[in-house]
Amino acid sequence: MNFDFSEEQKLLQQTARDYLNQHAPLSVCRRVLESGEPFAADLWKGAAEMGWLGAAIPEAFGGAGFGRLELVLIAEELGRALAPIPFGPSVALYSEALLQLGSESQKQARLPALAKGERIGTFAFAESAGRPAAARIQTRFEGGRVSGTKLAVPDGAAAHDALVVAREGSDLSLVLVDLAGPGVERQAVKSLDPSRPLARVSFSGAAGERLAEPCPDLSAVLALLRRAAVPIAFEQLGGAARAFELTREFALGRYAFGRPIASFQALKHRMADVFVALELARSNAYFAAWALEEDAPELAEAACSARVAAIQAFELATTEMIQMYGGVGFTWEYDCHLFYRRAKGLAALLGGLGDWREYLVRELERGAAA
Amino acid sequence: MDFKDTPEEAAFRAKARAFLDAHARRRSPGESRPLFDSEDPSVVAEAQRWQATKQANGWACLTWPVEYGGRGARPIEAVIWSQEESHYRLPPDLFGIGIGMLGPTLMAHGTDSQKQRYLTPMARGEEIWCQLFSEPAAGSDLAGLRTSALRSGEDWIVNGQKIWTSGAHYCRFGMIVTRNDAGVAKHAGLTYFIVDMQSPGIEIRPIKQVNGAAGFNEVFFSDVRIPDANRVGAVGDGWRVALTTLMNERASLSSGHYRPSVQPLLRMARGLELEGRPALESDDVRQRIADFHVRLRGVEHCANRTLTALSKGSTPGPEASIGKLVMAPLGQQLASFAVDLQGLAGGALDEDFDFQRAFLGSPAMRLAGGTDEILRNILAERVLRLPPEPRADKGMAFQDIPKGRS
């Protein structure tokens, strides 16, 4: 039994934490949130130089050639820092899709620039609110051209390329589209978490290139989302852990009725509950990381469980954060809302709690690993 | 990252399996453990025979030193053994309190002659032991116990009442914490003894539980004489000795390898009808099942992180302490939800799934070995290092502490 990361992997994580402590204090997240910058370009460049963007990309395609276990630990650290960069969309979704479903030449052509951070990719899926359904995908891919409108595309304004879920005949396809090309219109939309912007992207006959491997139906799309859900669960876990550390520190320093508020059992017990939620999320996330790295049959169940637990832990940690900070927790000036927004934003990124509980039960019905 | 045994662990597992195959029958898939009737002396005798067989072959109290009848094994090997043992049809284990908690306490605090006299018969199962700690007025606040011990020559005279004592009626010895001095602070006036359960003045009454079973007893002490030679630790140092016992209790409660699943609930929901279709098609039911599953798996993966630490020979981290706090309320919620799903039929004991029985038994898990509330205090104070609870009885002599109803 060795259900833990190796010493080398932990060292890599510590290096990432040190780098981010120096280069990404919470003021960087706030800067992006307040300024309308699409993302922290300096931090993105740093992340590329550190090899993080290509952590899971083989060296032959310009990456660092580590594995998924290294990738998830980097994601955890970016989550702790509330890093305002397109890591999830570009690395966990777009690059991962190319690695999984791209042809050799598609990988050759695109992965090196993604690893260097020179190009940013994203994922354009949702066309309406609610749980994804194949019938509601109206965007079409015909004769090499994409037409349709996608809502809430993460980093949709800043990204160079998008992977678009489109209808092709009676099937679905995943189509690569250059967002700077003709036939693409992008309109920034207000984001629940402005440190991670969204855009509405309309395609009218934009040139597209199908990913080599077929992705004919919704379940194939969901398989891709599940792979992305694993590093994103670590990002959520990192954010939740940091929120909880700050909450604990605040409650120890804040006095009421002559005592630190952290000494009141009403708060102590709830902090114990947050701790439990974090440990459940961490343990589920570790198992999903193992399943992702090994491509184990348990991956589908593990990724769904990890995502559900991570959404729950981050939401609990951040709602309790504001509650325990009290009135100041609701001010713009304090950082609580940065965590609160990020928790819900990351929950929405791949579809929320209800969706993922449903995906999980579908796996359990198959009897997988239950 | 992997879930494999090391070569040494794999070899150990193979040895354990070979012994079990030679001496016991493997349970068939789905075969549950037989219900244990502790009133039946033949069951106790059978359990003792199995314990003796294990001990004679080096498979009892694995982590104990060889000189006391153990194997001197590493903690991870004890876990591997219990994983393997759980696959076989075996008599009930009546020795856990002795071997897991009281034996280690004796090793830490007992005299040489106490260790010589008691440990090996405990390991062999010849003498079964019980724990006499809780009292009607001292549960979570154990140090508030009132059973008195007064010195009389070479003996101590004990009077009072203990409660929640598992197996008192078939136990040969017990470990008891008593108050020898009510004039000092509550933690300072306690003394710990070994008590012969056949002593005159001991009366044992079974407690009928919510679920109708009677696994626990009340034990009454009326002028029971305990020789001073049976004292464990110094006079007035009983709290420190008791803490050793309690630490070992938590360790043995959290090292379980119990792996529950939502599959029985899922199967039931597939077979039940709700609004004219299987309950399993209801979104509400699916959402609840998913939630249960995620928590169950979380605890299971947590346990594997703990095993990893044991396998490496290091001390498990704080994740080791969440298992019971998650599982106990979860068991209750899952059983309650399942009974609800059965609708009007939910009031009847169900043959196939037995959720009603689980529902009735589930409150116990949230109380035994540290209530949910005490466990949250422990997490908050020892793991998160938050300030301790203010103590209204701090610095007071025990006799001056307000007592309330018992």
Image (cartoon, coloured by chain):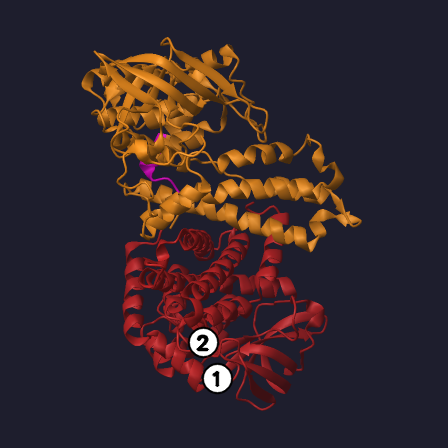
Chain colours: A red, B orange
Q: Residue at x 30, y 76 (%)?
A: A23
Which is more toward the observer, B152 or A175? B152
A155 part of magenta stretch = no
Image position of B199 with respect to B367: above or below: above
Label 2: which secondary element: loop
Position of residue A140 in the picture relative to residue B324 (left or right)? right
Tell me: B97 left or right of B340.
Answer: left
Instruction: Give residue B19's quadrant in the image.
Output: top left
| Residue B11 within the segment the image draws in magenta | yes
Q: Which residue is mark 2?
A: A86
The span picked out in magenta is B4-12
Give coordinates of residue B331: x percent, y percent. Answer: 55, 40
Q: Position of residue A184 (x, y in %)?
A: 59, 88
Residue at (50% x, 10% y) in the render: B42
Q: Quadrant of the N terminus of chain A?
A: top left
Is the stretch drawn in magenta largely helix, strand or loop? helix
Q: Position of residue A292 (x, y in %)?
A: 46, 57
Outermost residue, bottom side: A182
Closer to the camera in the image, A41 or A6: A41
Q: Does the CB distance between marks 1 and 2 fall below 8 Å?
A: yes
Q: Is residue B130 above or below residue A7?
A: above
Q: Residue tagged by mark 1?
A: A158
Q: CA distance from mark 1 to mark 2?
A: 9 Å
Would you say B404 lies left or right of A8 here? Answer: right
Question: Crowding at label 2, few (<14), some or many (≥20) Cα neighbours within 10 Å?
Answer: many
For the C terminus of chain A, which image quadrant?
Answer: top right
